[in-house]
Structures are given as C-alpha cells and as structure tokens.
Image: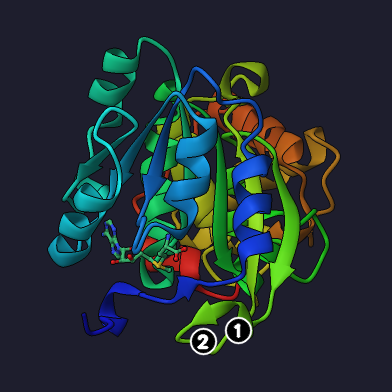
Amino acid sequence: MPVKPKLGQNFLTDQQAVQRIAAAIGDCANRTVVEIGPGKGAITGALSARAGHVLAIELDIDLATRLRIEFPPDKVSVVGQDVLRFDFAAAAAAAGERLLVVGNLPYSITSPILFKLAENHAFLDRAVLMVQREVADRLAASPGSRDYGLLSVTVQLYGPVVRLFTLPPSAFSPPPDVHSTVIRWRFAPRFTELRVQAEPFGRFLRTAFAQKRKTLANNLRAAGIAPGLTEASLSETGIEPMARAESLTVEQFAALWRCLQTAGATPPDEVAPAAYDSES
Ligand code: SAM
C-alpha cells in the first residue's frame, strides 16, 4: 500500500514510544478513547489493550479497511472519516461520558485539529497528541518566552498543556523532516474563572497579536479601538503602555478586555485565522 505524504503518513515504528503514548493517556480501562489518524494501527493496538473501547478515525479508506480486518469490532470501531468532520458530541453521548483523545497527528492540519478539539471541549476530558516539536514548544510556552504567542494563549485557555517527550525522525517510517513531541492537554476551560466570553475574547486576542512588531496599544488602535480607551484600560490594569502582547499573561489579557468592555469597547472585527500560524 503506497504511503500518502499529503495525509501526513509518517508511521511510528518505535515500540517504546508507542507504549509511552498509550500510558500517557492514563487509566482508560472503562473509557472510550478516540484515536485521530490510526494509520496502520501502531498506537491502536496498545490503546485497545488498555481502553474500554477505541474509536479510530482514519481518512485513508485503504488504511481504514485494513484496520477493520486487524482489530475486533467490539474493541475498535474504525470510522472512515475526516476527523475535522467527526461528531465528538454524538460520540460522547454514546459513551455516556467525556472522551479521551490520542493521536499522532497529520502535521499539516495540526491547528485545525487543535481548534476542533477546543470547540468540542465540553465532550472531552484529556488528549495526548504528537505534534511537530516547534508547535509543542508554542503550545506549552509561558509569557515572555520566545515561543509564546496567539496559539499558546488560545490553546491554554481551554486547559493546561504539558510537553511529555520528543522523538527524532528515525522513530518513524518514512522519517519526517522534523522532530516530534508528545503533549498532554487537559480540558479545563478558564472562561468563567476569567469572566470573559469565549467568542469576543478570542477576537480580542487575535487583534492583540495581529502584528508582532507593533505594541499591544498599536494593534488595538489599528483594529479601531479608541487610543484613549486603551490607554486608560492599560493604566487601570497596571500594564505597561508600550507592552507587547507576547509579554502578557492570560489573566492580564482578560483583565484588560473586561476593562475595555466596561469602558464601551466592542469586539474588534475578525482577524484572518492565519494569524495563529504566524511567528507571533
Ligand atoms: N497513528 C499512526 C502512527 O502513529 O503510526 C499514523 C500517524 S500518521 C502521522 C497520521 C495519520 O492520520 C495517517 O494515517 C493519515 O492517513 C491520517 N489522516 C490524515 N488526515 C486525516 C484526517 N483529516 N482525518 C483522519 N485521519 C487523517
């Protein structure tokens, strides 16, 4: 069966890594685990030995057929579908509880998959995901660090991310061009605690990070928020007038946004989603 590079088919061959990934999801004896992109089943086998049930979502129909032959349907249900169209709500309802997610992701659609999971956070408990090392660095980054940006804040708003371990290209066949890192993401959204609403706050964040070279105040001005409002809100929340978005904690962003809203600011217009993939 020929490898399909467009589907990010770099199959994990390091058996120790397979066991570490399956162990990293924690106790799943009576739980349903959704596996994103099971491929040839390297991780599926280890998961099915531990989990109550595995829902394996594979876009490649040839691989999905092969998995159906290899694994018993009472342990592994193979869904031949694009994970971006998968109905997590229905799967959680059928399982009667929140789902666990595991996946060695197709790297070209990492961000859309992360946003799909964030969107479905109510149906999810925790996820163990293999991503490109540089993306893992951004996902787990702290304010002020080189890797901290819009992706870090947005994902961490839905719960903490920790880096678990990194694998070299030689752990895969065919080897990818990059190192890979396994992360764990626990879904524990912070919107209520931060007293912000997900949608307008998300738009505010995208505005704040719109242009890396600009200060936060300049990015907000470019999006149409009156400079006087920004100046007063920065002062009230104790944030430096020349601060850049990359230096702010999520608590500071929330305090600033609450202050701006109280002063009458409306959520800025939408910024192109490509902003997540920039070096901001
Ligand atoms: N889990 C296997 C492993 O670790 O060896 C395969 C991982 S490989 C990096 C990514 C897998 O995701 C491939 O099997 C690919 O066909 C599948 N895939 C790619 N795009 C997908 C999508 N949109 N939805 C579901 N699966 C997808």
Instruction: Name the residue at 79% across, 62% down.
Output: 242
Asked where in the image residue 109 lies, by quadrant, the reply is bottom left
Against 89, residue 57 (above or below) is: below
Against 193, residue 38 (above or below) is: below
Q: Secondary structure at mark 1?
A: helix
Q: What residue is pinned by disc 2?
A: 175
- 208 left or right of 33 in image: right
The quadrant in which the C terminus is found is bottom right
Asked where in the image residue 120 lies, by quadrant, the reply is top left
- 96 left or right of 191 in image: left
Q: Amino acid at mark 2?
A: Pro
Against 161, residue 196 (above or below) is: above
Q: Amino acid at mark 1?
A: Pro
Q: Residue furthest bottom?
A: 177
Viewer-closest of 102 and 17: 17
Q: Secondary structure at mark 2?
A: loop
Instruction: Name the residue at 49% across, 53% down.
Output: 43
Asked where in the image residue 180 lies, by quadrant, the reply is bottom right
State the image coordinates of residue 248 (x, y, percent, origin top left): 76, 50
State the image coordinates of residue 135 (x, y, percent, origin top left): 60, 67
State the image coordinates of residue 71 (x, y, percent, origin top left): 30, 44
